[in-house]
Image (tube, helix red, strand yellow):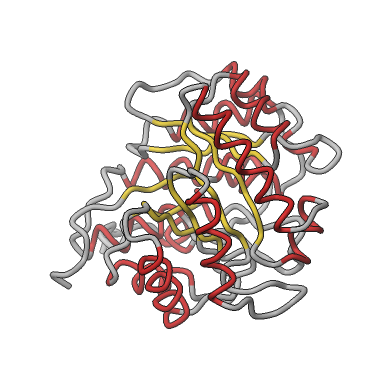
Amino acid sequence: MSDLPERISLREVGPRDGLQNEDPVPTEAKVELIDALSHTGVGRIEAVSFVHPKAIPQMADAAEVWSKVSQVGDVRYSALVPNLKGAERALEAGFKELEVVVSASDTHNRKNLNRSTDESLDDISKIIGIAHDRGATLQVIVSTAWGCPYEGDVPVERVVGVATRAVRDGADSASFGDTTGMATPSRVTRLVGEFRMANPETALNLHFHNTRGTGLANVLAALQLGVADFDASVGGLGGCPYAPGATGNIASEELVHMVEDMGVATGVDLEALVDVAARAERMVGHTLPSQVLRAGPRSRTIPA
């Protein structure tokens, strides 16, 4: 495993991608979750999304949540936006890192954003200019990158083309989202390879779901290609409201547990992260899918 990255960057997406798929939780509980995550060693947190409250009512209090977060100096916080109006709201709230989402699948994009993929890309080109003018960075997240619940397989060429269009319009980085857990290691290898050939200088993040049990296997495939930037969600919170059958993201504590044991640093305090996962489970009021939350780290022993 000597070819693996020495260190990865973890973006914690539980407060946004996780909680948007739960029954609405109180604003103060969201703030407490973000603040607790800020003290685990996680370097980046996707805190909120600025979407229309009728579309995602769980995120209706995004600006209020952000105003109450106790920011930790070495943690980077970001917001997800679906369109130009959402980007303007995020910038007005003070965010300096934005992610804008577009689906490689036209059908999913219409379900999610009520417009075609090309129309979203036109909007993204405007968002990039506005974000840069305000001193913010913007990452394009291409969802349904490994398949769509409505269309099935999405050609790799289309996925790369969507990302490349945004990169050429000025996006600072790219992310591929496995919206419904359709990725497998060989598919990860192909998409990452094709994207890198087209955009060798562009930073790449990967966002896996564990819907079909391949989440960490996909991480390993990406690590072997040198990818060192991943999303994960505390406790395995998450899903997609416009992707039937989609379950949670890979659990942050499971990702940290695996890669740290492989000699890949994360900077995260695993025990602290497991404690936050337990807090998140109590917050949403049902069992979360994380196995490390259930069993604990492999190094944890019990009395003989």
| Quarter of the image that includes the N terminus | bottom left
- The residue that appears at 69% across and 44% down in the rendered structure is 20
Viewer-side residue, 53 vs 31? 53
- The residue that appears at 17% across and 69% down in the rendered structure is 3
Residue 229's place in the image compared with 41, above or below, is below
| Residue 220: % across, % down | 34, 71
Q: Residue furthest left?
A: 2
| Residue 134: % across, % down | 52, 21
- The residue that appears at 18% across and 61% down in the rendered structure is 263
**Side of 217 where 247 appears, left or right:** right
| Residue 170: % across, % down | 48, 43
- The residue that appears at 72% across and 47% down in the rendered structure is 22
Residue 82's place in the image compared with 207, above or below, is above
| Residue 59: % across, % down | 72, 35
How many labels were placed on the picture? 0
Viewer-side residue, 67 vs 81? 81
**Residue 71, picture quadrant:** top left
| Quarter of the image that includes the C terminus | bottom left
Residue 297's place in the image compared with 234, above or below, is below
Q: Which residue lies furthest to the right in this view?
A: 54
**Residue 53, picture quadrant:** top right
Viewer-side residue, 172 vs 253? 172
